Image: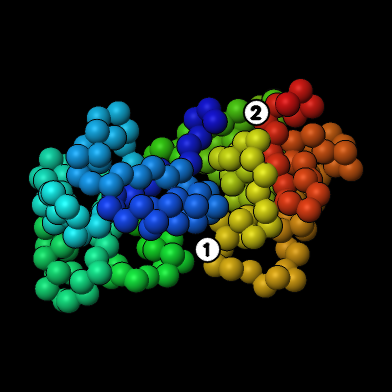
Amino acid sequence: MGDWQQPQVLVVDDDEALRDLLRQYLTSHGFAVRGGENAAAMDTLLLTYRPDVLILDLMMPGEDGLSVARRLKANDCGFPIIMLSARGEDIDRIVGLEIGADDYLPKPFNPRELLARIRALLRRQPEFVGKSAVRCLRFADFELDSEAQILRRAGETVNLTSAEFALLQIFVARPNQVLSRDQLMDALKGYERDPFDRSIDVRVTRLRRKIEVNPADPVFIRTIWGQGYLFAPKGASA
């Protein structure tokens, strides 16, 4: 993926079914998800891996979530923590937040609410912006400068609207992946679209006119019939 990365989420919970559910749901919304059943498994993963967000269960066998959060924050872990707990009493939430958790969600919860909270946390993380948006990405003879919000082709600026630029950013962050219209709309707006909303198709058509040699036969933004769109950064040679 070059300089671009999917947001990384680590789910630490002893409920395997919940871990699998969150892995499938968050992956479908553009996240890369790893999981561990307890603090020991988390510590092993953190030796070689740094998540953008940690989803941490409060009640786990062995070291519990409060202890884990306290330890991570004391060591300046650098990533936000969302705590989960079947115990919804205010005291648990207050203690969790006091020791450094960034958010708290009682079980059971709607995965869409967790998704919204993850996105809200990422929007406040300068290191996440630095990871995914401040760099330049090159494909073919294009250079996408997300910090300056400029697309250049062979050194010449390509005039894009803010909506077109945002859509292109989503594509280049997920090269060679089929993205459905729902996923694209969700990434752009952060909420579900009307099932008859065709604005994504309109945006794709406009973007193709500006980056494709032949918009009627696109090589970068390809239509995958019945599924959505795929961004091929190598164009015809992909």
Residue 83 at least partly seen: yes
Residue at image mark 2: 139
Residue at image point 77% right, 41% down: 222
The label nearer to you, 2 versus 1, is 1
Residue at image mark 1: 190
Amino acid beneath label 1 = Gly
Tell me: residue 98, above or below residue 53.
below
- How many numbered marks does the figure carry? 2
Residue at image point 24% right, 65% down: 85
Q: Is residue 38 left or right of residue 157?
A: left
Residue nearer the viewer, 110 or 95: 110
Q: Is residue 179 left or right of residue 111?
A: right
Tell me: residue 171, above or below residue 61.
above
Residue 181 sits in which quadrant?
bottom right
Residue at image point 34% right, 71% down: 108
Tell me: residue 194, above or below residue 199.
below
